[in-house]
Image: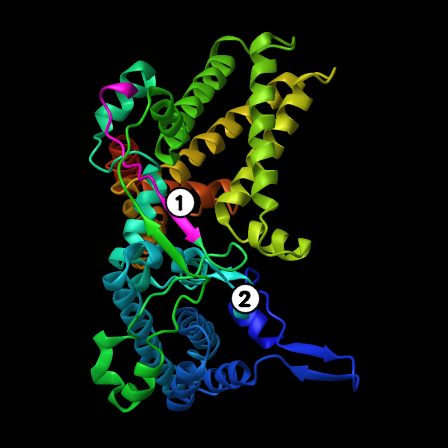
């Protein structure tokens, strides 16, 4: 299905249903189908008309952004004019989604956070936030509502004003949690209508911040004010309550930021144990340190299996495709397989098996250290640097190509002058480019050049 391919494996939707009366396939939601068709045909005005008449404004705008972005990636190299048109549509859908989210957040912040994570049935039981993440909609994710939502998830029940030093000191001395840290726990009471489902009675405007782009749709927009975030009604009262020491400890150890910090510390301990094994205690006999490392790697393997078993998507082949598409998961698989191979070769009764295992586990230690980069990606300062590095290397490749022109030309010219009629062997080829490469780093081989020049002078005189 075209829509499935454009949206990716995390998006599942069945646009057709089977009618048992006449045995024919019928459409579940014709306006939704026409909305998708108009998006794929890049009929922007028609798509906005069906968007207004549709059921869920925020998720539909994000789906339109994702579809157009995937469509652009497949057409920008063949049709420049169409790619420019899609760019304009992408900007408009991004503004519409941001406008809807801003109006929701201005009306009710709590229900806006619920709107971001609730499952949207018309788009395959996925959430607005997941669609935005999969489509890399940076403008949407950078909005205050999304950032506040992410900060609340990251800190859990802890307040945002807790410093890093406070958290670190409480990790080593958990009793400080009771007195040092601040908490952000609300006593929430819900009264539910219907069958226990949450429904937001939010009167939300729809993209008032982009009125200049869609003034001709204003009347229809007003008709949609009572629509967005359609859930059973919730009446909520919040108030601060006295937190007991037991609740403080519970919320401290449950907070994702604390779990991540403990994970980093435990991983550093693992690397220290691995380094101690390679340098001081590497032999053919099995030690308690070896067993501890094997158990530790097994826990890492179980975590990778858990990541592979995410509920979305539901198909196993799609789960594998989503898992393998992440370069960090490929590194994890390579690291675990290399560790198992190295440990197996280490105890084989063959000559040279121990040294081969030493080299394999040494390389395995490097791959384990590279996994730290993935852990550091969540840091607000280190994360952007990790994003910049691959892009910087791409630009650096062009400079390397220009540098190679000078290096190769100088290498061949200098070697032909200094060494006449060299033998045509691979050793000579390596020697030619090795010297030219080392010249870049300041190694000029003055002694060899002076000896060669003296020989040339003697031969010239004779």
Q: Give the camera-side residue of 179 and 393.
A: 179
Is residue 418 something one can see in this rendering? no
Q: Is residue 218 left or right of residue 268?
A: left
| Among the 4 quarters of the image, the one containing residue 254 | top left
Q: Residues within 10 Å of mark 2 (few under 14, many from 20)?
A: few
Secondary structure mostly seen in magenta is loop
Q: Which residue is mark 2?
A: 121
Q: Position of residue 199 (x, y in %)?
A: 43, 61
Q: Position of residue 98 (x, y in %)?
A: 29, 68
Residue 432 is marked as 1
* Quarter of the image where the C terminus is located: top left
| Among the 4 quarters of the image, the one containing residue 433 | top left
Magenta region: which residues?
177-191
Q: Is residue 299 left or right of residue 369?
A: right
Q: Residue at x 40, y 88 (%)?
A: 49
Q: Give the camera-side residue of 176 and 244.
A: 244
Magenta highlight on residue 189: yes
Q: Position of residue 222 (x, y in %)?
A: 30, 82
| Among the 4 quarters of the image, the one containing residue 188 | top left
Against 56, residue 373 (above or below) is above
* Quarter of the image where the N terminus is located: bottom right
């Amino acid at each position: 299905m075209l829509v499935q391919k454009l949206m990716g494996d995390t998006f599942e939707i069945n646009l057709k249903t089977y009618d048992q009366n006449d045995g024919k396939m019928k459409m579940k939601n014709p306006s939704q189908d026409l909305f998708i068709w108009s998006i794929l045909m890049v009929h922007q005005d028609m798509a906005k008309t069906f968007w207004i008449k549709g059921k869920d404004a925020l998720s539909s705008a994000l789906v339109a952004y994702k579809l157009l972005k995937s469509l652009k990636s497949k057409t920008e190299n063949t049709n420049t004019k169409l790619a420019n048109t899609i760019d304009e549509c992408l900007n408009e859908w991004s503004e519409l989604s941001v406008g809807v989210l801003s109006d929701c957040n201005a009306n009710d912040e709590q229900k806006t956070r619920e709107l971001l994570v609730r499952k949207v049935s018309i788009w395959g039981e996925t959430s607005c936030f997941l669609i935005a993440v999969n489509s890399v909609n940076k403008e949407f994710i950078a909005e205050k509502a999304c950032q506040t939502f992410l900060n609340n998830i990251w800190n859990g029940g802890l307040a945002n004003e807790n410093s890093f030093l406070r958290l670190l000191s409480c990790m080593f001395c958990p009793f400080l949690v009771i007195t040092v840290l601040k908490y952000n726990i609300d006593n929430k009471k819900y009264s539910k209508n219907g069958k226990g489902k949450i429904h937001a009675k939010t009167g939300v405007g729809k993209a008032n911040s982009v009125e200049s782009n869609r003034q001709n749709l204003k009347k229809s927009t007003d008709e949609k004010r009572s629509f967005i975030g359609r859930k059973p009604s919730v009446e909520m009262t919040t108030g601060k309550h006295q937190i007991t020491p037991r609740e403080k400890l519970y919320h401290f150890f449950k907070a994702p930021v604390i779990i991540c910090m403990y994970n980093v510390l435990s991983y550093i301990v693992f690397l220290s144990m691995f380094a101690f094994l390679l340098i001081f205690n590497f032999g053919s006999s099995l030690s308690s340190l070896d067993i501890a490392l094997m158990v530790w790697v097994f826990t890492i393997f179980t975590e990778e299996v858990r990541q592979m078993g995410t509920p979305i998507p539901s198909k196993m082949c799609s789960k594998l495709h989503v898992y393998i598409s992440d370069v960090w998961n490929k590194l994890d698989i390579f690291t675990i397989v290399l560790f198992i191979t190295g440990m197996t070769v280490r105890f084989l009764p063959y000559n040279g098996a121990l040294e081969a295992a030493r080299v394999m586990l040494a390389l395995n230690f490097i791959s384990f250290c590279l996994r730290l980069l993935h852990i550091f990606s969540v840091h607000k300062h280190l994360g952007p640097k990790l994003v910049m590095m691959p892009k910087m290397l791409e630009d650096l490749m062009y400079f390397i190509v220009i540098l190679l022109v000078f290096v190769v030309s100088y290498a061949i010219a200098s070697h032909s002058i200094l060494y006449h009629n060299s033998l045509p062997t691979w050793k000579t080829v390596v020697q030619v480019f090795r010297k030219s490469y080392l010249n870049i780093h300041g190694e000029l081989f003055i002694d060899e050049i002076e000896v060669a020049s003296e020989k040339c002078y003697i031969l010239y005189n004779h």
